[in-house]
Amino acid sequence: MSTQTVSVKILDKEFQVACPTDQQQGLIQAAQHLDKQMREIRTTGKVIGLERIAVMAALNISHELLQTQQKGASSQSETAAVKRISERIEETLHRCRQLEIS
């Protein structure tokens, strides 16, 4: 796997990041997302200092990630529950058919 240096801009500062070739687009999108989050925080004027803005952006993005993961886990759990209910319905219908035949 080939690695190349990718240049990304976050809050008007340029960073050089080593990245596998097949992951460059993802890195660029992540940098753009981070830049957007940091700009929004800076615009509010409530957080001063690049480091604090970066930490707040990291916390916001981490929160988004955890919510997405929890929704995914909830969705998987709901899918499993629907599958179990569906199997029970099928078993009951099968038993009812057996009773009708007898």
Image (tube, helix red, strand yellow):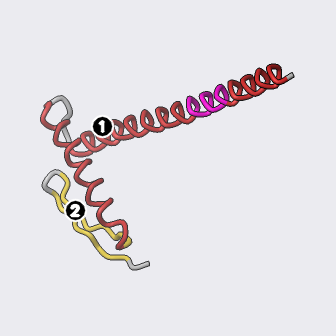
Q: Quadrant of the C terminus?
A: top right
In the image as oriented, which residue stretches furthest toward the right? 102
For the N terminus, the image quarter is bottom left
Residue 8, labelled with which disc? 2
Residue at (13% x, 55% y) in the render: 12
Q: Main secondary structure of the magenta part?
A: helix
**Residue 15 image position (x, y, % from top left):** 23, 63
**Image: magenta residue range:** 77-86
Report the side of 28 relative to 75 (left or right). Answer: left
| Comparing labels 1 and 2, the label whose residue is closer to the camera | 2
Picture residue at 25% right of the left edge, 48% below the top: 33
Q: Amino acid at mark 1?
A: Met
Give neighbour class at mark 1: few <14, some 14-19, many 20+ (Cα, 10 Å).
Answer: some
Amino acid type, label 2 = Val
The residue depicted at 26 percent of the width and 48 percent of the height is 34
From what the image shows, is residue 2 above or below residue 51?
below
Q: Secondary structure at mark 2?
A: strand
